[in-house]
Amino acid sequence: MSACHFSDSDCIGQQRVDDTFNPNSLEAQIALRDFCNKLHDFSHEDIERFKIRRDFSTGEPEIKCFARDLDLFLAAESTVSGANLTLPWTYRKSMKFMESHSLTYNTLKFNTSFPDVLEIPIAYWLNDRYLFKNKSSFNKFHDLIGERIGPYSSPLKTDFSEFYGNRLVYFGVQVNLTLGRFSSGYVEGKPVMDRWESFVQKEMAAMPPGLQNGFQLTKDYWHSLAVQKSLKDSAIFGIVLGIILALPILTIATENFIVGFVATFCMCCSTVCVVGIIPLIGWKLGVRTLEKVLEALNMCMVVGLTVDYVVHLAEGYHLSKRLDRKSRVQDMLEVMGLSVFSGACTTLGACVFMFFAQIQFMVRFGIFMFSTIGFSLIFSLGLFPTLMGMIGPDGDTGNIKAIYRKLIRRCS
């Protein structure tokens, strides 16, 4: 991707192939065949668990794994020719096969160093014995098998535009699922993606060298789920980090452990209510990128917005010159209560106008802001004064400076 500019969304990078990929060994060919057989032999429970789609007419699972079909084709060819052409293939078998089809192949260029012995039967199978009569019926695997011209590539005697003995560069296995990017949500799709990831990693770890770098992908859906997971984790991390930072900062600002803890608790209550509003009104980290980013961004902003009101009241409690908690709560509300209420009302009033916008981003952001400020106002002017009137510190109780002075006297 280094050749792509970050602003170019259409750039897909430069294609590179894995130089360690080698399906030609006997162990690799057997492993590929066994892997395909394992997929096709999935039980009904496995098909349901992995959400594999079944063909509407035949009821068979929609799986395209070339090694199974290739081996069935070679078995049929073995019956006709009287020679064993099934997998695995060796250099000797490839040479014997090409020599028996001398009108098609020229073997003068080949020697015992020829590595891609599996390409000979694959190309013969994909191109319908090089008859080119029913080539279209074999095209379902053409996109799943990749090859490039190599040092042993040679043109057919019957068609100079077709080459054999090429280098095999990739194999693909296609499995159609019942899930879809727009038909299945994160809750349903993420476990299936993880199930497939675990299955692929386990199978690749058991493969012989040359086949262990396989991976799973989809055009859009898995990527969409991964983006949603990243946004969800980022939102949770932002909320947790904000609360973790708010507790010591509020404690230092008010110089009191109790005031800092109660203020942080009220922030947590506001945050929980705002997060709870999202599923209640039908929102989620949706299928559209804008929705994902908006919800994740909003979650990261919750803590920063909710602290704005309770911190003023906590500071008002701290600055009160009285000693008993009820008098300090009264001073707090007299000094800061009206300012906090007025500031919240202006923000709430501004949010109301966003409800009537035609752009959904504006509507969603307005609802989010209104909910956040509304719950912050309720808990800062309702819950916080109540708790401070019940358990708020009297005198120097919980005061950081007083505790520090006592520790110094003890140490002295």
Image (spheres, rainbow, N blue to C red):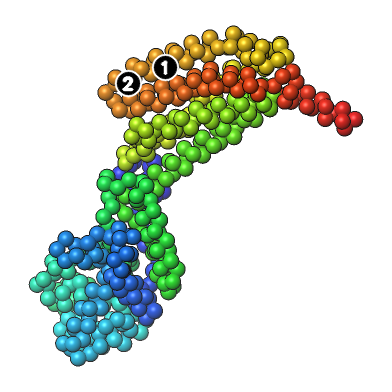
Residue 85 is drawn in which quadrant?
bottom left
Where does residue 315 sit, x and y in percent of width and height?
63, 17
**Count of all numbered marks drawn on residues in the image:** 2
Q: Tell me which amino acid carries mark 2.
A: Phe
Cβ–Cβ below 8 Å for labels 1 and 2?
Answer: no
Residue under numbered circle 1: 348
Q: Quadrant of the C terminus?
A: top right
Q: Residue at x 18, y 76 (%)?
A: 156
Q: Can residue 249 be seen here?
A: no
Residue under numbered circle 2: 355
* Relative vertical location of residue 137 with respect to residue 403 in this rendering, above or below: below
* Relative vertical location of residue 406 with respect to residue 29 in this rendering, above or below: above
Where does residue 238 sit, x and y in percent of width and height?
51, 36
Q: Residues within 10 Å of mark 2 (few under 14, many from 20)?
A: some
283 displayed left or right of 344: left
Q: Residue at x 28, y 60 (%)?
A: 52
Viewer-nearest residue: 22 or 26: 26
249 displayed left or right of 87: right
Residue 282 is drawn in which quadrant?
top left
Which residue is most to the left? 133
346 displayed left or right of 146: right
Secondary-structure class at tag 2:
loop
Viewer-nearest residue: 364 or 230: 364
State which tag comes first along the sequence, 1 or 2.
1
Q: Residue at x 24, y 65 (%)?
A: 61
Secondary-structure class at tag 1:
helix
Q: CA distance from mark 1 to mark 2?
A: 11 Å
125 displayed left or right of 373: left
* Relative vertical location of residue 162 with respect to residue 99 in this rendering, above or below: above
